[in-house]
Structure formats: C-alpha cells, structure tokens
Image: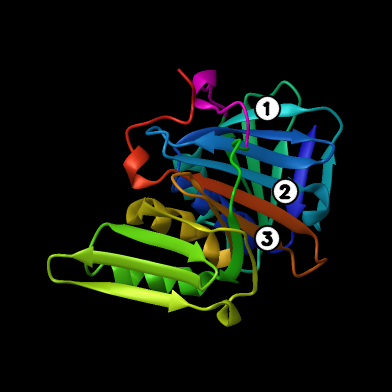
Amino acid sequence: MFSAKMQDSKILKGMIDAVSAIIDETYFVADEKGLNLTAMDESHICLMSMNLPKDLFDGGYECKTQVKLGINLEDMTKIMKRAGASDAIEFKHQKESEKFQVQMKGRGTRTFSLRLVDIDEEKIPPTAELDVQFDAKVTLDVDILDQAIKDAEIYQDTLQVQINKDGVKFSAEGEVGDIEYQLDQDHLESADIQKGGRGVFSLSFLKNILKISTITDKVTLNIAENAPLKFEFEIANPNNQARGKVTYFLAPRVEEEESYESD
C-alpha cells in the first residue's frame, strides 16, 4: 500500500499544476524514501524531475515497496482543482489496484479515483540529470525572473540570459525596441560564478516552468555557454520545515530541434 498525506493542499496542488504544464502523463514512483517523478516534454526541450521526501508529507507517509503509478496529468489537474484551501490531501494506492485515489478532508471527506494508465517507457527519460559542467550558479527571487519574462514578452518570444562576474542580465530585442534588465551581485541571494555563460530560451517554456512559483520564492540558475539552463527550486512545508526539490533543464533556442538523447 502507498499513502502520502499533506495537511496543506497548496503544495500538492502547486506541484501538479507545474508538472502538467510541461507534460500530459508520467509515472509517479513511490518508495520508502518518498515520491519522485522524471519527465520530458514531447519536443525534448525541457527535462524535469521532482523529489518529495517522505518527511514533506506532514500527515503521514507509507510505502514499504516501490510502486510505479501511471498518471494522466490532465485528469489529475481537474481533480486537484477541487481541493479547498483548508483541505488536507492524501494520495493513496492499494496493492494490485488499477486506480489511484486522491482523498480530500475538509468539510467531510471526498475520495476521487483515477484509473492508472500505461505510458510508453520511451517517453520517460532514463535519468533526472544531464552531464553538464556549469560555469555559473546564482540564486535569486522568483519574482525577478517572472518580471524579466513579462518584460521580454513586449518584444520577443525568447529571453536571453547572461551570467558573468557583473551579475545577471536578462534581455530581449524585437522590431519595436528592446529591454535589458541588469542585476549586480548585491541583488542576488548567492552567486558562484567561474567564467559565466549565456543562452536564449523560449518564453513559453519559461512561463510554464515558473508555474512552480506559487509554492516557492527562490530559484537557482546554473548556466554554461551553449548548454541547457538548469533551474532548481526548493519546496518547503511550513508545518514541519521539510524540503522537496524540483529541477528543470531547458535547452537553448538554438537547440530547439535537437533531443537530449543521443542518437
């Protein structure tokens, strides 16, 4: 049996919303340590992983043997939207059952079931990490990146991200003009910059990645020249200070037609 319960619905609602913005279906993999998933969008531009340790589930967690659950995220999102702000949410699966359950407890108890789906294994990336040597790592407020994305939308459908010893620069240029947003290191939460790097990234994917911002306020960016941009988000449960992690790798626009997978 698998059971994972959280007293605050906001965290699980935010996570499902963020995952469904990138992919349509994936496997939830639960074991004795926690709940995980790894997924890649169909165009192979964005790789994401999510790790929710068992301590993050302040209402209790139970899973003695690994279980792999195929979830249709469009349907799952519809269910999660039915959760009230004060509801506790529990994910449940009975051994050998073909259904995944979402139980919401607030004014009474509501139990939703969702039939498990079989997913083509080729759609699931073999690893949650890419073999990339990054040249700079900075942590900043999520709302700064959100502001840069909204600024860039005035001019273009991409955002250039550049990190060097001077700090971070976001920029975009179009037919009607351009925008440059410069942040020196004093405006960063932390910075470890060796030689820096830059790349141009799709605003559409950046906006989808930032859907996770409803449940976190900091983002760590890892960059290297002509390499995917790595995003790291920490998810904290305010009830017990346990932390989960969500990671994205976003390919630069110049690699749009390429796959992360080797030929």
Give the residue displayed 41% in from the left and 56% down from the top.
206
SS class of the residue under badge 2?
Answer: strand
- Say whether disc 1 or disc 2 marks the residue closer to the N-terminus: 2
Are the residues flagged by discs 1 and 2 in contact, CB closer than 8 Å?
Answer: no
Give the residue displayed 50% in from the left and 56% down from the top.
81
Are the residues flagged by discs 2 and 3 in contact, CB closer than 8 Å?
Answer: yes
134 drawn magenta: no
Above or below, comparing residue 95 to residue 19 in the picture: above
The C terminus: image quadrant: top left
- Give the alpha-carbon distance from disc 2 to disc 3, as whole Å: 9 Å
Three-letter code, disc 3: Ile
Three-letter code, disc 2: Leu
Give the x, y percent position of residue 128: 62, 36
Q: Which residue is mark 2?
A: 52
How crowded is the residue under tag 1: few (<14 C-alpha within 10 Å), some, or many (20+)?
some
123 drawn magenta: yes
Displayed quadrant of residue 83: bottom right
Boundaries of the magenta span: 116-128
Displayed quadrant of residue 45: top left
Give the x, y percent position of residue 168: 49, 69
- Say whether disc 1 or disc 3 marks the residue closer to the N-terminus: 1
Secondary structure mostly seen in the magenta stretch: loop
Residue 68 is labelled as 1
- Say whether disc 2 or disc 3 marks the residue closer to the N-terminus: 2
How crowded is the residue under tag 2: few (<14 C-alpha within 10 Å), some, or many (20+)?
some
Residue furthest left in the image = 175
Residue 235 is labelled as 3
Three-letter code, disc 1: Lys
Above or below, comparing residue 256 to residue 164 in the picture: above
